[in-house]
């Protein structure tokens, strides 16, 4: 049994070494901008011209020659206006100024902008209350980017700023990595589909729903591959079919040591190579990670909270690497003040459903009452998980602790 940190590093190590380069697709940014969000870019984006393409004012005010305003009280004749998209057609001469708006091109002859707040109008003249220095309140052409310069690197994850930059430089079609297809299989005789009538000892297959949502949040394309009963032959057929139709397989249930926990044995019979089959965490100890027929395979515990936690820790980085990321994002732990004592047992790391608030501007976390790894309601009420390290299982109120946000909630 290994620590969750070591297990996560093993996933990253294996995927980095073995994952095939993802297929590339082209996306029309103008037609489907939302589809590009979170995707990995497979090309460099270059500036098509200098940015800004002209000397650009960053304030509303007046374009002047600094030499004309060496002392407060300078009185300059107003000769025109420059606004965004419509430049002043002329030059600023001695004793003159041009009204200018934010984003407008600086007129020829001017080398400074004076803000409205530091001026007053007297007929056709503008009186300046302050001295002016050259270069004040405008951005030189080419300061932000030069023509031909790489403005977005290959391998970048696209978010709103990157998409805005691609649009600004006229790159309307983006080459991006295809989302990895992640097959989801739930195991167990007790499972029924969500819409079926439920018997007294049956359980609706909620894991298939939560896993599909987590796959999508993690950047993958969920592939619902159904459920498999506790029968080795049927489970094998389902696994083989899923591996053929996906880039990665995630199974839930059947990974413990009970009589009907068949996942590891079936994967072994299929020639799988295993890297770990137990992790020192609660919930989620009997987590399996292996490689079968050229693809990563995860066997997650069947209890819903265990499935949710282990997916976040181990499957998300695999999806990111299959998506073309150079390296996965680190777990987004942050610090918070513990609201009450916590006392855990077992010599493993604990991920406890919790809620963080900011009552006085600082993060305060409180562990929620929960009934173990089958209690989905606790995670519904939670916005994070409190990490209790195995090296220090007793925590006092007021201590600074590690908190993992619940993806999509916080």
Image (tube, rainbow, N blue to C red):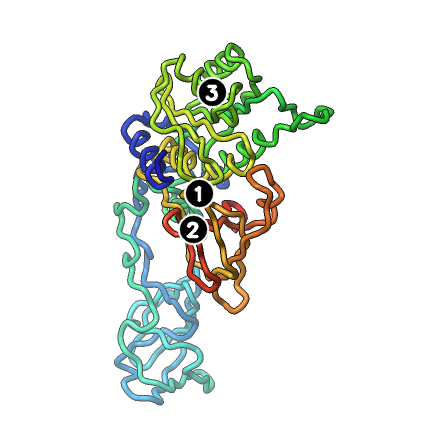
Residue 83, percent from left and from top: 44, 65
Mark on residue 346? 1
C-beta proximity under 8 Å, tags 1 and 2 = yes
- As drawn, 220 above or below 347: above
Q: Nearer the viewer, residue 3 or 383?
A: 3
Residue at image mark 2:
393
Helix, strand or loop at mark 1: loop
Helix, strand or loop at mark 2: loop
- As drawn, 255 above or below 373: above
* Comes first in the chain, label 2 or label 3: 3
Disc 2 versus disc 3: distance between alpha carbons? Answer: 32 Å
Disc 1 versus disc 2: distance between alpha carbons? Answer: 9 Å
Which callout, 3 or 1, points to the residue nearer the camera? 1
* Comes first in the chain, label 1 or label 2: 1
Residue 367 showing in the rendered view: yes
Helix, strand or loop at mark 3: helix
- What residue is at 52 percent from the left and 51 percent from the top? 410
Disc 3 versus disc 1: distance between alpha carbons? Answer: 26 Å
Q: Nearer the viewer, residue 74 or 258?
A: 258
- As drawn, 314 above or below 239: below
Residue 302, percent from left and from top: 54, 30
Residue 48, percent from left and from top: 31, 45
Residue at image mark 3:
263
- What residue is at 29 percent from the left and 53 percent from the top? 145
Graded by Cα atoms within 10 Å as few (under 14), some (14 to 19) or many (20 or more), the crowding at tag 2 reads some
- What residue is at 37 percent from the left and 43 percent from the top? 329
Residue 2, percent from left and from top: 35, 36
- What residue is at 53 percent from the left and 48 percent from the top? 353
């Amino acid at each position: 049994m290994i620590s969750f940190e070591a297990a996560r590093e093993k996933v990253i190590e294996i995927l980095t070494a073995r994952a095939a380069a993802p297929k590339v697709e082209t996306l029309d940014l103008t037609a489907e901008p939302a589809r590009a969000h979170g995707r990995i870019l497979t090309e460099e984006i270059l500036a098509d011209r200098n940015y800004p393409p002209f000397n650009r004012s960053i304030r509303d005010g007046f374009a002047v020659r600094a030499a004309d305003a060496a002392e407060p009280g300078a009185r300059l004749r107003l000769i025109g206006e420059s606004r965004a998209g419509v430049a002043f057609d002329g030059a600023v001469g001695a004793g003159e100024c041009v009204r200018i708006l934010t984003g407008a091109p600086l007129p020829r002859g001017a080398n400074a902008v004076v803000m409205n707040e530091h001026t007053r109008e007297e007929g056709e003249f503008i009186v300046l209350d302050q001295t002016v220095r050259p270069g004040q309140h405008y951005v030189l052409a080419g300061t932000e980017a030069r023509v031909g310069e790489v403005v977005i690197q290959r391998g970048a994850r696209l978010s709103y700023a990157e998409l805005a930059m691609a649009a600004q430089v006229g790159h309307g079609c983006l080459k991006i990595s295809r989302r990895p297809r992640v097959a989801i299989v739930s195991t167990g005789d007790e499972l029924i589909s969500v819409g079926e009538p439920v018997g007294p000892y049956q359980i609706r297959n909620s894991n298939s729903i939560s896993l599909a949502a987590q796959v999508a949040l993690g950047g993958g394309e969920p592939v619902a591959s159904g459920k498999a009963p506790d029968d080795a032959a049927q489970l094998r057929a389902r696994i083989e079919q899923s591996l053929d139709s996906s880039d990665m397989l995630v199974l839930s249930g059947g990974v413990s040591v009970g009589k009907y926990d068949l996942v590891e044995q079936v994967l072994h019979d299929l020639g799988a190579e295993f890297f770990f089959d137990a992790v020192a965490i609660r919930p989620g100890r009997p987590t399996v990670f292996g490689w079968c027929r050229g693809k990563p395979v995860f066997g997650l515990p069947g209890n819903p909270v265990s499935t949710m936690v282990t997916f976040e820790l181990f499957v998300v980085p695999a999806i990111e690497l299959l998506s073309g990321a150079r390296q996965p994002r680190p777990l987004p732990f942050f610090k918070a003040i513990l609201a009450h004592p916590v006392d855990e047992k077992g010599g493993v790391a604990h991920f406890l459903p919790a809620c963080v608030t900011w009552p006085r501007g600082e993060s305060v976390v409180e562990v929620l009452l929960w009934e173990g790894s089958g209690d989905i309601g606790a995670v519904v009420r939670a916005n994070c998980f409190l990490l209790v390290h195995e090296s220090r299982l007793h925590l006092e109120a007021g201590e600074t602790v590690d908190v993992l946000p619940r993806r999509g909630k916080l």
